[in-house]
Amino acid sequence: MPQAPSSQPTAALARMPTASVRVLVGFGAVLLVSLVVLHRRPARTVVGGGPAPDPAARFLSLSKGANATIAADLRALTAGPHLAGTTAAAGAAARVLSRLRAAGLRTLTREYNPLLSYPGRASLALLRADRTLLAQLSLGEPADVGRRLVRPYHAYAPSGGAVAEAVFVNLGREEDYLTLERLGVSVRGRIAVAIRGGGYRGGVVQRAAERGAAAVLIAGHADGGVERGTVILGGPGDPLTPGWAATGRAERLGFDHKAVKRRFPAIPSMPVSGKTASAIIRTLGGPALPAEWQTGVGLPVDIGSVGPGPTLVNLTYQGDRKMAMIQDIFAIIKGYEEPDRYVILGNHRDAWTYGAVDPNSGTSALLDIARRLGIMLQSGWTPRRTIILCSWDAEEFGMIGSTEWVEENLEDLHSKAVAYLNVDCAVQGVGLFAGSTPQLDNLLVNVTRQVKDPDVEGKTVHDTWKKMSGGINIERLARTDSDFAPFLHHAGIPCVDLYYGKEFPGYHTALDSYHWMEKHGDPLFLRHVAITEIWGLLALRLADDPVLPFDYQTYASQLQEHANAFSAMMKNSKSVNMMNRFVDDLSDAAMEVLKEAKDLDVSDGYSLMRRRLLNNRLLLAERSFLQPDGLQGRGWFKHLLYSPPEDYESKLSFFPGVADAISRSSSSSAKERRAAVWHEMWKISRAIQRAANVLRGEFSHRSESLNSSVSVAP
Ligand SMILES: *[C@@H]1O[C@H](CO)[C@@H](O)[C@H](O)[C@H]1NC(C)=O
Ligand SMILES: *[C@@H]1O[C@H](CO)[C@@H](O)[C@H](O)[C@H]1NC(C)=O
Ligand SMILES: *[C@@H]1O[C@H](CO)[C@@H](O)[C@H](O)[C@H]1NC(C)=O
Ligand SMILES: *[C@@H]1O[C@H](CO)[C@@H](O)[C@H](O)[C@H]1NC(C)=O
């Protein structure tokens, strides 16, 4: 949308390119001073007086026609595949850069050289029990008609192979192996054939490997799509530079280093089409398929038995691991009052296939935010704090672009980042789904009241969100499947993650195309507009509100709920009682801060400074939940509340240290287990106390007298 021409002289100056501004500065001190003033606070002093227009209203007013530009950007971004580290990735990168520049924003790129992984030679055949060839099986993707895409594979799967009987393991979850055990079937020395849907595919491979399987095949659905994906283990980031950035000449660990080895599965694995999987499963003997597995299997044949054998499967795989160049792209809008406070919006750009859902629905939304902010800047608005738009590379291999950047800038982010707002698959269907750290819940909910529902006339997103089954349900971000992971789990920065729709059937397959989006995902591109508005309004509030819109009372209530849920799960309220007083103290501190913000004295020359001091405490409180040395045995994960648990199937989506203590203590005594859990609960309690102290901004001074009747041992 073209901006209506403004006759105001200040706005005209603000529109000038920097170079001409610099020339003008040469004309004299008076002009210089006025420029500085202009640069400092253009949004608050519109010439001729009168209040500056509300940036949120201005942002929303730019929605007209946005669906068309979003659609055009998505079409261009998804014209071809753009897998990270390949030459084909350059097209999408160029598009993003040129669109950010066209919006008038300052851009920046940062390159890294991580270890990536591509498919080499592979073969799959079915043999008779006497090892003669029964059939060659296809490892291709039926839905990739033009053969334009990278062959289906699992990034970082080791090269190797096996000639062995197959066992059908359903989804390959813990409970599926328990079922197999009951049937007397083991995968040891055999090839496990699973159907996608058993959680993180790296976890599926790891569980099979732990049981001695020789290799794993993971089947796609009957629609002909085959799900590519990473099977990297142990968290995000480049495997050779754990904890530091994979810059060109950085230190790199060797492949035999144990910190590197633990990142790769021990056995080869491949995704296969539903057709290929059923060709194998159809030949299996052994016990009949258990009744509970017969629903929702999604394969094109009725399968009868789980195996093993009598046929043999011959799998060979030669992967190609190599260092490749990846590129993160940034647009930076400097804040006028607090340029050293960062509100960061991010989405990844790299895709397994065309990426119309994953991730470029989010990219086109990000570009529309850039477009709108560019127009607002031209008309004289400047955010109070700095806004950074990020386009990450190599997320699909394990959040590599974002992780390397966070690792490289950790100190800066610790002291300056306000929040990180992530959108990956912006649109894959109907309905808002959101995750956040709890201090952002209220802001998120409030913002959805301002956004029109894309599917129901006359309603807001908030109206329809409220009516979803289970009501407004904000997820906590203990997943490691998108770029918020390094920001939250490693750096302790408050995060939001947004998406529209769930369970996209074409995930990581040839079906993730513009055609699908236009036909099924978002025919009018209005869900894209809704996500753009929510994302943009969140950023504007965080960047422009005088006092950061963080609510730590919500955080305290959430912690209380976690503690209660945990106590119910453990059937033990002792550890929860221990934690209560810390949570109560956080709640009190949060209330004091809210009150302080309300009473903030803005009457004198120090008011800006006082507000900044208050904001600093709000900014830093989340960092209190970090444990400097990290979780036990996996120190990269430092967040004590919302890092992912080590066990991919853990039922606990908070308190990861406690989850680890439970899953690791299966072989130890009840007493040892209690002690380990108790120690982890104490770590969390101390972190909560730190957060309360940070919010108050004072040294703790309440005396705690030791009550002799309190037990000191678990
Ligand atoms: C398995 O497949 C590989 C590659 O096609 C082949 O070299 C090998 O001989 C096969 N093994 C058997 C036992 O057929
Ligand atoms: C959200 O809205 C409620 C009700 O209008 C208000 O009390 C609260 O302060 C708002 N919170 C934030 C963070 O915007
Ligand atoms: C954008 O939305 C309008 C309705 O608001 C619709 O008529 C138009 O076709 C949409 N454009 C695209 C490209 O989907
Ligand atoms: C000490 O603890 C006991 C049992 O938990 C409690 O009944 C008592 O009130 C406590 N005393 C003080 C002074 O807090």
Image (cartoon, rainbow, N blue to C red):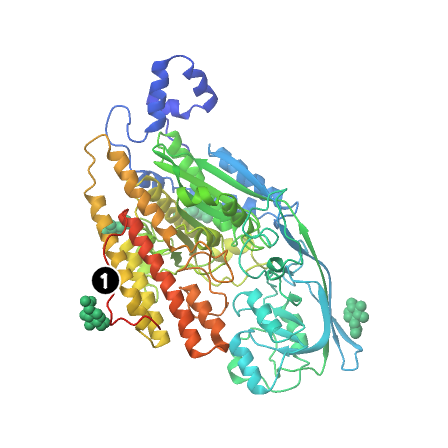
Q: Quadrant of the N terminus?
A: top left
Instruction: Decide if ligand 4 comes within 8 Å of the CB at mark 1.
Output: yes
Q: Is residue 287 left or right of residue 697?
A: right
**Vertical relation: 497 (above or below) 415:** below
Question: Which residue bears the numbered disc 1?
Answer: 705
Count of numbered circles in the view: 1
Residue 471 place in picture, x, y as percent: 32, 64
Residue 689 sits in quarter: bottom left
Q: Nearer the viewer, residue 189 or 507?
A: 189
Residue 354 place in picture, x, y as percent: 58, 52
Label 1 crowd (10 A; few <14 / some 14-19 / many >=20): few
Q: Nearer the viewer, residue 210 or 389?
A: 210
Residue 375 sits in quarter: top left
Q: Nearer the viewer, residue 100 or 688?
A: 688
Indicate the secondary structure of the residue bearing disc 1.
loop
**Vertical relation: 326 (above or below) 605:** below
Q: Is residue 302 left or right of residue 482?
A: right
Instruction: Examine the rendering and report whether any part of residue 377 can be seen.
Output: yes
Q: Quadrant of the C terminus?
A: bottom left
Residue 194 place in picture, x, y as percent: 59, 73
**The residue under label 1 is which amino acid type?**
Ser
Instruction: Examine the rendering and report whether any part of residue 551 can be seen.
Output: no
Quarter of the rendered structure image containing ligand 4: bottom left
Residue found farthest to the top: 27
Residue 273 place in picture, x, y as percent: 64, 67
**Vertical relation: 80 (above or below) 172:** above
